[in-house]
Amino acid sequence: MKHANNQWRTALLACALCCLIPTARACGHCLEDRVASVYDHALVEHSKQNKQVMMYLVWDGPVDRTAATRQWLLKALGAVRGVVAHSVRVSLEPPTIALAYDPLQTRSADLEKALQGKLSAKGMTASALPM
């Protein structure tokens, strides 16, 4: 009986200690959280097979974070020269964009500038995440 009582106490103590350990939560500010919000493994693999390059960007601006904004971003960015239209992924929170582009059609610096031009029409900004 004493042995069973000790097991019960040990189990209770273990449960209590587990409750004290803080859980890890995604804050949305670090690079990993942002990329994870738009990451699509199938897209990454497809892009590699087609010799395309993935680009991840942070976006911001005085716009409502709504489905309409997300749709506008998908359409506007998919129309930029060099971007593979169906590859655009948009996260509203954290505000992040992923897309694949053809390096034979555009350089990353030129693409970032073109994307910035599209977004500036709505007062928005974008900057590439270091990868």
Image (cartoon, rainbow, N blue to C red):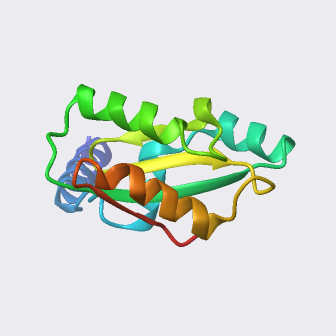
Name the residue nearer the viewer: 71 or 28.
71
Locate residue 75: give its quadrant. top left
Residue at x 17% of width, y 60% of height: 20
Query: Which image quarter holds the N terminus?
Result: top left
Residue 72 left/right relative to 68: right
Q: Does 131 sit above or below residue 66?
A: below
Residue 82 lies, in percent from the top left, at: 67, 47
The answer to whether 117 appears left or right of 41 in the picture is left
Near-viewer residue (60 or 95): 60
Give the total number of marks visible in the rendering.
0
Coordinates of residue 118 in the picture (x, y in percent) = 40, 49
Nearer-the-camera pick, 104 or 55:
104
Residue at left offset 14%, top offset 40%: 64
Name which residue lies at 70% across and 58% down: 106
Is residue 108 at least partly visible in the picture? yes
**44 to 32, vertically: above or below:** above
Q: Is residue 22 left or right of residue 52?
A: left
| Visible residue check, residue 24 | no
Residue at 48 percent across and 38 percent down: it is 89
Instruction: Residue 49: give x, y in percent of width and height.
Output: 85, 41
Estimate the x, y position of residue 131 in percent, counting from the top left.
59, 69
